[in-house]
Image (cartoon, rainbow, N blue to C red):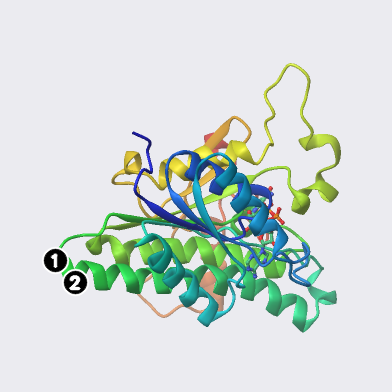
């Protein structure tokens, strides 16, 4: 008996990179998988059915069950059709892994409208649209049976969104939005038995190959720390019943390291029983910014600082 026997999963952007590994691992653990991929360039141009079909063929060759879907995740009707395809072809939906993504990096002052819109569309809308239709399917099922559905969503955020990477205003805004949406949807869907979590992966794919240089290449005597496959065990654990009770969480996975990340929270506080004035705020500033120079953004923390 495998972990996902009898389960149905959708993985978006599963034709390449990290999503491909998720689809292969889910299928090898018994899931029937809808392999979604538009098949465009890393910047989101064009479309090609080959990557999704290749992964479907790979799964079938190993005796697994999979079907391709070529819709763009940023299409509202495409997302609805993708969920319907899982139900029509495999009889239901248990797991949604939102993973599809592109990069259009530019400094804010050079970014054009299309670069902003496309990245927000693919990541933020592309995570929400599929989740929205999966959630409405699960809500209807739960109403029908009067029982929780036991389903899972795993989203893909990024450290870039949580800590802020120069040159990625579009991508970081979308990824931070995905982290927030994960918490909102975890709260909304808990009562119908859906858990929602997110990962922040770091892996060697076409998105990182050009910027990471040798850093991500396998080193002799070490396991291949940045292989995309290294991310998928965490995703499959989150998507399985082994992770019962875990919801609304964001987990970083990089090489042999896994971290639980937590976001915005009060760090310091100043209070007054009168309306704030510019002068009273200025007087409170040394307390408010006690551990940070004014204007310093919150860079990536060390584990000990959390
Ligand atoms: P990748 O380019 O290898 O794979 C992404 C896949 O998504 C591609 O096959 C692409 O065709 C598909 N895709 C793009 N737009 C789509 C759309 N509109 N509809 C359907 N499919 C679409 O990149 P990857 O590194 O495997 O990225 C996977 C996810 O992980 C992305 O969300 C990315 O932002 C995130 N991520 C990756 C890293 C990393 O280190 N590689 C770090 C942080 C976050």
Residue 306 visible to an observer of this rendering:
no
Label 1 SS:
loop
Residue 182, image x and y in percent? 44, 61
* 10 Å crowding of disc 2: few (<14), some (14-19), many (20+): few
Q: Which residue is mark 2?
A: 143
Label 2 SS:
helix
**Alpha carbon separation for disc pair 2 and 1:** 5 Å
Q: Is residue 169 above or below residue 247?
A: below
Q: Which residue is mark 1?
A: 146
Left or right: where does residue 211 sit relative to residue 205?
Answer: right
Left or right: where does residue 66 sit relative to residue 205?
Answer: left
Residue 303, image x and y in percent? 55, 36
Query: Which of the 4 image quadrants contains residue 167?
Result: bottom right
Residue 238, image x and y in percent? 42, 45
| Cβ–Cβ under 8 Å for marks 2 and 1 | yes
Q: Is residue 218 above or below residue 145?
A: above
Kindly identify the residue that appears in the image at 77 percent across and 36 percent down: 216
Quadrant showing the N terminus: top left
Q: Is residue 185 above or below residue 32?
A: below
From the viewer's side, name the closer residue of 59 and 15. Answer: 59
Q: Is residue 118 above or below residue 105?
A: below
Residue 80 visible to an observer of this rendering:
yes
Residue 9, image x and y in percent? 44, 55
């Amino acid at each position: 008996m495998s972990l996902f026997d009898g389960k149905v999963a959708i993985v978006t952007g599963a034709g390449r990179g990290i999503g491909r590994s998720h689809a292969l691992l889910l299928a090898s653990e018994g899931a029937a998988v809808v392999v979604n991929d538009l098949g465009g360039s890393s910047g989101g141009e064009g479309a090609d059915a080959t990557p999704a079909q290749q992964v479907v063929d790979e799964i079938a060759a190993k005796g697994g069950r999979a079907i391709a879907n070529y819709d763009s995740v940023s299409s509202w009707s495409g997302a609805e059709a993708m969920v319907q395809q899982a139900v029509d072809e495999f009889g239901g939906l248990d797991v949604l892994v939102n993973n599809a993504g592109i990069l259009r990096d530019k400094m804010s002052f050079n970014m054009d409208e299309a670069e902003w819109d496309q990245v927000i569309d693919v990541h933020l809308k592309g995570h929400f649209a599929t989740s929205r239709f999966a959630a409405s399917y699960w809500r209807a099922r739960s109403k029908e049976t009067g029982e929780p559905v036991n389903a899972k969503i795993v989203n893909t955020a990024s450290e870039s969104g949580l800590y802020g990477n120069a040159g990625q205003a579009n991508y970081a805004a979308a990824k931070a939005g995905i982290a927030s949406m994960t918490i909102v949807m975890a709260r909304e869907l808990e009562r119908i038995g859906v858990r929602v979590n997110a990962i922040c992966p770091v892996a060697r794919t076409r998105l990182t190959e050009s910027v990471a240089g040798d850093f991500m290449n396998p080193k002799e005597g070490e396991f291949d720390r940045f292989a995309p496959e290294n991310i998928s065990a965490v995703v499959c654990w989150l998507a399985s019943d082994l992770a019962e009770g875990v919801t609304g969480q964001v987990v970083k996975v990089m090489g042999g390291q896994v971290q639980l990340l937590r976001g915005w929270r009060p760090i310091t506080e100043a209070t007054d029983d009168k309306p704030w004035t510019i002068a009273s705020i200025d007087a409170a500033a040394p307390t408010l910014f006690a551990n940070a120079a004014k204007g310093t953004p919150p860079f990536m923390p060390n584990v000990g600082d959390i």
